Amino acid sequence: MSHITKIILITLIGFTLASPVLAQVAINNTQSDDKNARARNYFGDEILIDQDGKSHRFYSDLLSDRIVLINVIFTYCKDACPLLTQHLRMVKQQLGKRFGAEFRFLSLSVDPEHDTPELLKRFAIKQYADVPGWRFLVAEKAIMAKVLGRFGQWTEDPNNHGTLLIAGNTRKAHWIKIRPDSPPERIVADLLRLSE
């Protein structure tokens, strides 16, 4: 048997053995694509603007392949929003280096007719929350009503907005609700469970 024939034979055997593995990879990729498509359809991919004036697609840029913690704010709130933001700062500190890389926070405005990226920036700076990995987001009212409505968090009156925290891992399609008065350690434990 010639040297060339041996190489061809070895290559063919290797391809035959690898075929089931390649087929499984293709099936897994297709299932992953289907999961992504279903999640994108459910959550929507509307464009939101962050506190730096940057545009983000809601599912593709903000949720996809991430563990996120979502809360609702409005910038002229004098009590609940600043208090909850400070509470989340403690959660962020306990997450350490994993915050921003593995875990991200999204603070969504429930008052899009008043809140602008500039006002969100001012609010984030005042709360010491204008950091990488924490986005304060707004869009026109119809979009925010749709996005927050999917989480059961939309209200026409910002003063009556909910304070419930929503956390999720889109890779695993696993979402939970977290009470805002939970101790930071409990919130961190809930987020860490989402990453397992």
Image: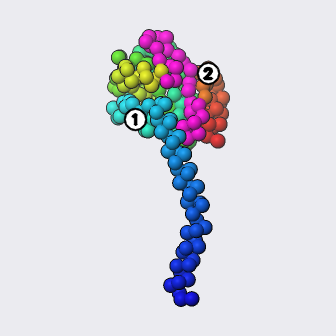
The residue identified by callout 1 is 57
Q: Which residues are magenta?
A: 150-175
Kind of residue indicated by mark 1: Arg
Comparing 127 with 132, the one in front is: 132
Coordinates of residue 54 in the picture (x, y in percent) = 35, 35
The residue identified by callout 2 is 179
Measuring 37% from the left and 20% from the top, which residue is drawn there? Answer: 142
Asked if residue 49 shows in the view, the reply is yes
Measuring 59% from the left and 60% from the top, which residue is drawn there? Answer: 21
148 is within the stretch colored magenta: no
Q: Secondary structure at mark 2?
A: loop
Q: Which color scheme does this rendered protein use?
A: rainbow
Measuring 60% from the left and 67% from the top, which residue is drawn there? Answer: 17
Q: Secondary structure at mark 1?
A: strand
Kind of residue indicated by mark 2: Arg
Coordinates of residue 37 in the picture (x, y in percent) = 48, 39
